[in-house]
Image (cartoon, helix red, strand yellow):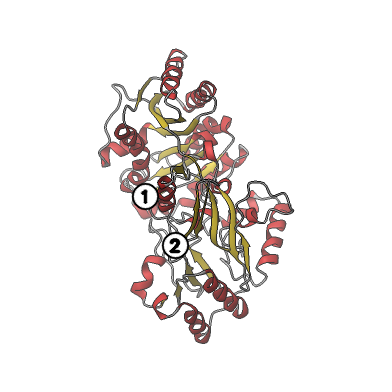
């Protein structure tokens, strides 16, 4: 078990990075202790900002020897509280935002080797400079960092075509509790030589080791995108439309986002988003195909066929990059507009694709039974079955009173998700928020294996204690 660090231990830890990067002043520490939605405010005796893998190694060696809990943080964009030190526990916060080197870019190999503190948008831009694509796209890409992306196995809008962060990584460098460094920075796409250690750490939320660098996969940059904004009658129509588009394009659909009418109304109320169609629809889809210019014709034909089949009410295809960005802005604005509507609870869930309509219908019904004026807003990555089943407070209700009922509201949705064979965390992780649910969502055998892995890699429980696995 972790112990409260002594003043001597804190001074020893601070000495690793130097006083400039060992923060003790409350004002200087505050940006690292405040979760961006205001749901978690942390406290720590010390924030450490190491600049090298060697410094991370020395920090973990001291922490392991003294039993000091270390909480890791990259861009502080996490949504389940795992990156915030808990008040009263004297957890030391280690932030990797100084580790920003891009060690190598190899367009011939289609790889980029970066340190954990590199911002995702920087990786995208560096890939663009060599006419390559790094396809991970998420709302926080301007501030989230690669270490956190890998620790949580981030998803986003391009998972349908390219996979999660796990699928976009070839190798990693990891510092283990005790300070040992595993250099797994291989650029191989095939390496069948035993256990896949890389994938133990990706998605482990920093509980087994600290990712300090990674080899990322790059892809040829698509020559062309065709993007459509589509009005549809139902989630089932969206599934039918996706199947039709995939069949007609030969699997070239790279993004397929579902949004309800309420989301469109929120964006029009708070942002410069216009009404695209003469008549409002119950649901909307943003669909994108990527590849050759011939896909323009493919998209047009697919939408025409869908309209004849009654699964599309209306549609518009972007005729320029500016129009494409206008369409995608709708999706981006939905995220922020919910905050402007008062209390908002976010549930990142996934079910098999064919069960998405049932999830939305039954989850909405359960919410309305619990609180008749509640405002459900399920939207997201339909193509991979990941729905952000978010919920806004009733108009006029006290915000804090609404947020205080988050557990009962979440259970309305999670009951449906679990009954449909789904996951209560598709891409945001477990963190602190959902750790107490693990005994409900994991079998005893699976939970035992996870605890045994934690005990093997981190026997003194110094890395992110209380995250993922409840204490």
Is 315 drawn above or below residue 359 in the view shown? above
Q: Would you name the residue on which mark 1 appears? A: 343
- Horizontally, residue 193 falls left or right of residue 337, namely right
Which residue corresponds to mark 2?
A: 100
Q: How many marks?
A: 2
Can residue 445 be seen?
A: yes
Circle 2: element type = loop
Residue 275 coordinates in the image, percent (x, y):
28, 29
For the point 46% across and 73% down, the residue is 48
Q: Position of residue 352 (x, y in %)?
A: 59, 35
Image position, residue 400 (x, y; %): 37, 55
Query: Who is closer to the viewer here, 179 or 87?
Result: 179
Q: Nearer the viewer, residue 397 or 431?
A: 431
179 in relation to 152, above or below: below
Q: Quadrant of residue 251?
A: top right
Residue ID at (46%, 43%): 132
Q: Is residue 418 above or below residue 15?
A: above
Residue sticking out furthest to the bottom: 8
């Amino acid at each position: 078990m972790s112990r409260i660090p002594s003043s001597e231990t804190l001074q020893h830890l601070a000495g690793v990075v130097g006083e400039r990067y060992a923060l003790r002043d409350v004002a200087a520490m505050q940006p690292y202790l405040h979760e961006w939605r205001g749901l978690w405010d942390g406290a720590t005796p010390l924030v450490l900002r190491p600049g090298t893998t060697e410094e991370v190694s020395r920090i973990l060696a001291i922490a392991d020897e003294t039993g000091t809990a270390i909480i890791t943080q990259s861009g502080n964009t996490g949504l389940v509280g795992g990156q915030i030190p808990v008040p009263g526990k004297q957890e030391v916060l280690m932030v990797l935002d100084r580790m920003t080197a891009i060690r190598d870019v190899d367009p011939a190999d289609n790889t980029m080797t970066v340190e954990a503190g590199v911002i995702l948008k920087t990786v995208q831009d560096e890939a663009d400079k060599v006419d390559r694509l790094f396809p991970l796209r998420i709302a926080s890409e301007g501030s989230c960092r690669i270490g956190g992306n890998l620790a949580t196995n981030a998803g986003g809008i391009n998972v349908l075509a390219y996979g999660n962060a796990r699928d976009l990584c070839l190798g990693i460098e990891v510092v283990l509790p005790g300070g040992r460094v595993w250099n797994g920075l291989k650029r191989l796409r095939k390496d069948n030589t035993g256990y896949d250690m890389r994938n133990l750490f990706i998605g482990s939320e920093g509980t087994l080791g600290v990712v300090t660098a990674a080899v990322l996969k790059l892809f040829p940059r698509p020559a062309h995108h065709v993007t459509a904004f589509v009005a549809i009658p139902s989630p089932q129509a969206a599934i039918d439309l996706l199947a039709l588009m995939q069949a007609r394009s030969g699997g070239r659909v790279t993004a397929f986002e579902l949004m309800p009418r309420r989301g469109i109304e929120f964006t029009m109320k708070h942002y410069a988003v216009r009404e695209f169609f003469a008549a409002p629809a119950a649901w909307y889809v943003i669909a994108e195909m990527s590849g050759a210019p011939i896909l323009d014709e493919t998209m047009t034909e697919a939408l025409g066929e869908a309209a004849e089949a009654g699964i599309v009410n209306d549609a518009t295809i972007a005729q320029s990059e500016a129009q494409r960005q206008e369409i995608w802005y709708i999706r981006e604005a939905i995220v922020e507009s919910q905050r402007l509507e008062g209390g908002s609870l976010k549930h990142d869930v996934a079910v098999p694709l064919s069960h998405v309509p049932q999830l939305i219908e039954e989850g909405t019904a359960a919410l309305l039974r619990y609180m008749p004026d509640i405002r459900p807003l399920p939207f997201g990555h339909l193509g991979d079955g990941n729905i952000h089943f978010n919920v806004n407070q009733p108009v006029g209700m006290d915000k804090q009173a609404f947020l205080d009922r988050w557990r009962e509201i979440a259970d309305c949705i999670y009951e449906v998700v679990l009954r449909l064979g789904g996951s209560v965390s598709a891409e945001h992780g477990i963190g602190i928020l959902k750790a107490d649910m693990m005994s409900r969502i994991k079998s005893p055998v699976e939970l035992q294996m996870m605890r045994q892995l934690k005990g093997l890699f981190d026997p003194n429980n110094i890395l992110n204690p209380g995250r993922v696995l409840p204490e």
